[in-house]
Amino acid sequence: MAIILFSFSCGSNETKTEEATSDTTAAATTTPSPAAPASTTTTVPQTTMSTMHKVKDFDAWLASFEANDSLRLANGIHKYVIGRSTKDPNMVFVVVKVDDLAKAKAFSKNASLKQAMQKSGVIGTPTFKFTTLTFRDSAQISATLRSNTSITVKDWDKWQKSFDSTRQLNTDNGLAVRAYGYDPDDNHKVTIVTAILDSAKAAAYWNSDMLKQRRAASGAGEPTRFIYTMVKRY
């Protein structure tokens, strides 16, 4: 009887050891599923104010611009993007995010802003433009060449549906859509920001009959493009 009990006990311990080994091996070979990549796009509306003006000296202007951050913050305005025209590097393109449209409009006409701009070396009268961006892509890309395109559309909803459905055409032709939206006071006035990944392809596409047909089908007029190099993004 003692021999039988001893044998039974040994067999039970071996079984437990095998089960434990099996569980440990299973746990060690199980790997977690890779997490889905975070989306870099958003459709949450963001109002921006863009300014275009010429400066005497870009470096001197930039230093003055960044030194006046408190003036902007006091009016609910936040630095966003600075660019320079490819045709004239002293032609500066500034885009800022705004918290309150009415307050930003008042700020654009403020005497203190005018004085600060003149002191920084701004030449002539700057132009201001407001846009409600309804699509933005914040993915990091190496290309710094940008196109800011202004068009007039007959119907915003129809244009947006057409543009989104054919966005792959931009990618196929050396362009990456970074943002688009409309004038908060008139959604027939549309702005599109694209990164230029291949200048030759983009130029050919902009002059193609295919794009002309695409614009006609979506109810869009002739575009006006400003090409610039993005030199700083905050």
Image (cartoon, rainbow, N blue to C red):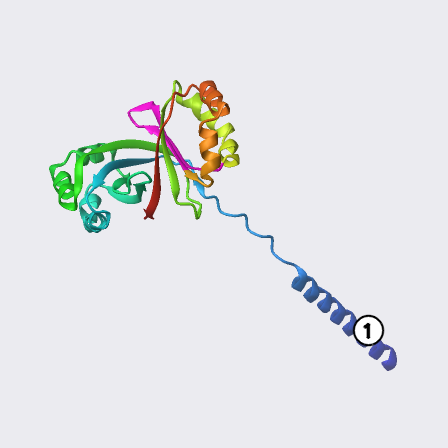
Asked if residue 168 can be seen in this view, the reply is yes
Q: Residue furthest bottom?
A: 2
The residue that appears at 27% across and 38% down in the rendered structure is: 99
Q: Quadrant of residue 81?
A: top left
Q: Quadrant of residue 189?
A: top left
Residue toward you, 111 or 224: 224
Query: Is 205 on the left-hand or right-hand side of 53?
Result: right
Q: Is residue 210 magenta?
A: no
232 over 168 or under it: above or below: below
The residue that appears at 48% across and 33% down in the rendered structure is: 170
The residue that appears at 67% across and 62% down in the rendered structure is: 29
Query: Is 161 on the left-hand or right-hand side of 78?
Result: right
Name the image quarter holding the N terminus: bottom right
Numbered disc 1: secondary structure = helix
Residue toward you, 43 or 115: 115
Position of residue 144 measured from the top left corner of the image (x, y, whole percent): 39, 45
Residue position for label 1: 11
Residue toward you, 65 or 77: 65
Position of residue 123 measured from the top left corner of the image (x, y, whole percent): 17, 38
Q: Quadrant of residue 50?
A: top left
Q: Which residues are magenta?
A: 174-194
Query: Is 83 on the left-hand or right-hand side of 202?
Result: left
Residue type at mark 1? Gly
Total marks in image: 1
Asked if residue 135 can be seen in this view, the reply is no
Q: Is residue 178 magenta?
A: yes
Position of residue 39 measured from the top left corner of the image (x, y, whole percent): 48, 44
Q: Residues within 10 Å of mark 1 (few under 14, many from 20)?
A: few
Position of residue 136 measured from the top left corner of the image (x, y, whole percent): 40, 38
- Dominant SS in magenta: strand
Query: Is 111 on the left-hand or right-hand side of 202?
Result: left
